[in-house]
Amino acid sequence: MSKCEKAIVTVLCMVYNGNKILLQDRVKKDWRGLTFPGGHVEKEESFIQAVIREIYEETGLTIREPKLCGVKQFQTDEDERYIVLLFKTDKFEGTLISSDEGEMRWIDRDSLNDYKLVNDSMDLLKVFDSDCYSEFMYERSKSGDDWIVRLY
């Protein structure tokens, strides 16, 4: 039995400006609500290149010095490991735009509870902000019907 497994690698980035964070109001049916922008890492692309490209495509902003601050992961129904590399930066330039993936909005951190966020946004924010956590993992419950969030 091989110890290798198929993996899907993606990136998310928390772009922030003081107390405001840039969130995308996702329109995708299986993941609606406000969340951090990002997307898939393309073949032979570095993780840094991917996060810079994805943020530009979805927001119109060119980010600099994205810092890897954590990982989110889960096992898909096809038994693939889905890995999300979490980056953050407050260094950017350009004019904010939205994409067909959703409208971009600057949201004050203090008002996040007033918005419809995707289910895991607040837990992801803990990883983005924390010196204690670096991993967000979804584990299936013993019954297989529910997901359990683990922060490490």
Image (tube, helix red, strand yellow):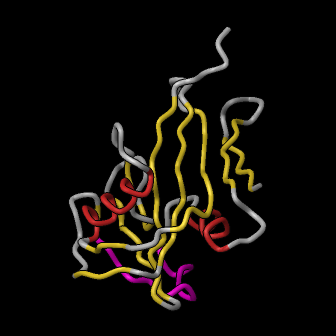
Q: Residue at x 45, y 54 (%)?
A: 11
Which quadrant holds the N terminus?
top right
Residue at x 61% of width, y 69% of height: 128
Residue 40 forms part of the magenta stretch: no
Q: Which residues are magenta?
A: 103-115
Left-right relation of 131 to 70: right
Q: Image check: 107 left or right of 75?
A: left
| Residue placed most toward the observer, 139 or 89 | 89
Q: State the image coordinates of residue 114 (x, y, percent, origin top left).
A: 51, 81
State the quadrant of the C terminus: bottom right
- Which residue is pictured at 44% across the width and 83% down the height? 107
Residue 51 in the image, given as x and y percentages of width and height: 39, 59
Q: Going by the picture, which residue comes out furthest to the bottom?
A: 18
The front one of 44 and 119 is: 44
Q: Quarter-wise, where is residue 56 in the image?
A: bottom left
The image position of residue 64, as x and y in percent, is 39, 73
Residue in the image at 46% along x and 59% along y: 12
User: To which quarter of the image does residue 22 belong?
Assistant: bottom left
Residue 26 at x, y percent in the picture: 35, 61
Left or right: 104, with 124 as reference point: left
